[in-house]
Amino acid sequence: MPNGAYARQVPWSHGKTAAISACSHASPATPRTSANARPTWPKMPRRSITTFTGMPWPSPVASARPRRQRPSTAACCRARESSTMRSTAGRKMANAMPACAPHWHWTPGAGSNMRHHESPIHAMPEPMPSITPVSIQRSDIAMARLHRGDPGREQRGPQKPRGQARSQQCATALRRRRTPLRYPTIVATLALFLASMASGQAAPLDEQLPFEVDNARPAVSTRQGSDGLIDSVYSGSFSCTDWSGDLSRSDRAADGTSIRRWSARERNQGSLANVMLADPAAANGLKAFTWDNLNGDQQEMLHRNPDDPAGRGDGRGRERVAYLLGERLNEGDGQDDFRKRQGLIGAIVHASPAIVSTPGYLAHLADAIENPEGRAGYRDYQAFRMALAGNDGRQKRLYIGANDGMLHAIDAETGVSTFAFIPTAAIPGLHRLTSQNFGQDGPPFFVDGTPVVRDVYFNDSLGWRSVLVGTLGRGGRALFALDVTHPDAISLLWEFGDNTPQGDPDLGYSLPRPEIVRLHSGQWAVLQGNGPASAQRRAALLIIDIQSGRLLGKLLPPPTVEAPNGLSSVRAADNDSDGLADYAYAGDLQGNLWRFDLLPTGLPSGETQQDPLAPSALGPVNLADFAIAYQATPLFSARDDQGKRQPITLQPSLIRHPGRLGYLVLLATGRHSAVDGGTDHSQTASVYAIWDRKSKGQRTLASDTGARRDNLLTQHPGSQRTVDWYGENGTAHWGWKLDLPMDAARTGERVIADMTRHGHTLLFSSQGHGPAICSGPRESWLHSIDARSGASALAGPGTDDSDSNPDQQPPPISLGTRGGFALAAEGRVFGNDTDALGGQQMNAASDDSGRRSWLVLPEQYR
């Protein structure tokens, strides 16, 4: 990370104080040009909460911005006083972090257990802009605007005594207040701003969510999406009292304030429109959700009395259908009444919104990948994009799963629900939504996964299509695909379950995030880890055709002695920038890290050819050539110091090895769900980087896997040890490991969402053990480390020794899923973990990770 870029680990905890030491960083006012100008820092209202959810960077074509005004000591101290927050169960969140200086510098207040664990973001082509938070009131979600840092600050030497005095005055003022934190539980929103969630992406878990125990306001969930440079933030939320949900939009105004545009709960009080079910006989695969359109078995399910222990029917199925569609007449507090709701949309707990608007691939690169031979009849991507562009084109939609049994499509401009789909696998539990006892034992889950949307090519007849793949997450064992090319004419492509004709019994709970790729066989497919609690309790990689839903293949790692097992989220890798997935990496519940070869590997071990991964070099590829690498041996097995297996439940991340030989596979351990085994906070969780040396298409042997816990470099929070990759006499390291701390009660931290990598910096959130959801706060931390070594790359708090390049423009980074892979200019293709962010990204420089996604253009450049 260049000079001026800071990513801090911040503890948010009950009764602890975190202050921002920013006054000492105030720089003398200097003339600004368009290359280093900054916007004016906005004043922060006292009663507000800022949550960081997106990273909209300055536009490359932006003109010179106003000079930043240097705050006075009094103003800075007032801002720092307002930054102090309290975390108290049952109270509303309040008091934002201030913006009184261009660089964030977190320092612990009285009683804080601050741990610095940070590193620069090396691949950023210029200083990572400082954070200018924009505050909005109470439980609303605020946006964070970044502006460019000052590359010369670190070269000016130590801070002047005057600045130090100001910092000391501010600290003294805070010590007098001694106000505890008010933000309950996790810093996952800040982590999602710089890192996860997600996004998109395997979500934080049911017992690890922010909440607000209040009858009037829903809790703020960490499920957000952003529109990139448009500065719109979409936030999903839920109430702990009646398990109703909401999706809201907030926009950034010209003066830096935040404006709440709409609330889907408020805009959809009357009824839900176009609620659909699967209908294989229909041309579009759908039919309206009405009583008469249900088959006999489905009607019997809705007749069941949810409060009858024997599950006997009460004959009120038709009324329940009306209730689910928005009828409120039967709601009440009586024993025979249906459950009261604040709104019609159910709780949005783990799902993030997928944002779909104008197609955003780079057309000439998409065509080069899909039609390299220039065949006649091919329908080019530019025509597809232009047909859906403009005022008369495709309107922007938000697709999000909710625990009312539906995937909702929300108009991004109005907040009105325009479409909803009830997966067949969710129907058996719909009767429970009317129970007065609904949610007494915790949030019930239905459609709880984050959808993934990609533009894929079907055939020369249908051309390019926008396909959404959704999962039930903790709600069941199923996934589905919708054609959302035209939001007013959505069609169902397929449903895939554990006991459906088009499905597989090895599918467990669909917690893993789908990975949409183009295979060397020429097909677009979904790579799906089978998840926990499948019928045979084993791990499996399912390869599903994106158009038909047909199971193309299944790769089964050898069973382990320990059981049960299941494969987690998959990370695909394109090693040679041709748009085709070459490898896939995933962990399982027994701590095994697997590599799957999605191409033939017939070359002898250690040998390569000129371009072994190119389609022309491979020739025709059969799915039967796909295999588990290293002769079906794990690349690594994660175990703690006592030899106990450490479950891998999150999606791995990838980075090129510093020596340009193979990949470093980055993974975190720790079980996160009560599904199939629950959590064990008495076991140490770890973050690993494992060296995969064989990535040139060669055959691999079991003896080629050398990574073990005892030959990994051990790092600690804040340490700066160096990895010895090429040591002699068996001293070489095969990666590094970082064990997360345990407290005195032997309850350890867990990484709570998919890790995110920006350049060479790995960002992730961890959380300690604590009360169940809606019962109390928990401590959480944000970590930032050098992915190549696991070390902190900062010499100390507020110090950055890395180089900067102010002559290049940084990329815009945002949350919210949209369109697939990202292709760089000049044929160079690489990935930026955009899927971990779940969003679109324009890359200014390579981050050495290998190509995994196509570039998605910002809206204003289409």
Image: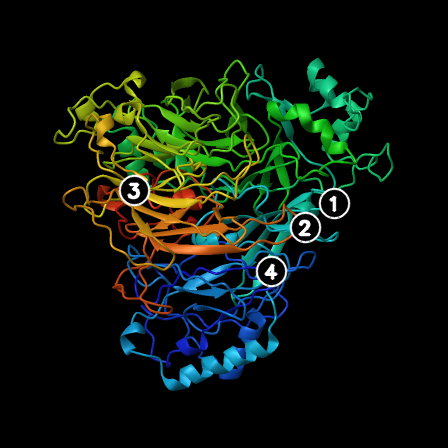
Disc 2 is placed on an element classified as loop
Q: Nearer the viewer, mark 2 or mark 3?
A: 3
First-in-chain label (2 vs 3): 2
First-in-chain label (1 vs 2): 2
- Between the C-alphas of marks 3 and 4, the distance is 37 Å
Q: Which mark is residue 573?
A: none
- Between the C-alphas of marks 2 and 3, the distance is 47 Å
Q: Is residue 112 above or below residue 286?
A: below
- Between the C-alphas of marks 1 and 2, the distance is 9 Å
First-in-chain label (2 vs 4): 4
Rendering coords of residue 27 (x, y %): 38, 78
- Between the C-alphas of marks 3 and 1, the distance is 55 Å
Check if mark 1's residue and mark 4's residue have beta carbons within 8 Å: no
First-in-chain label (3 vs 4): 4
Q: Nearer the viewer, mark 3 or mark 1?
A: 3
Q: Is residue 493 above or below residue 454?
A: above
The amino acid type, in three-letter code, at marker 3 is Asp
- The answer to which quarter of the image holds residue 311 is top right
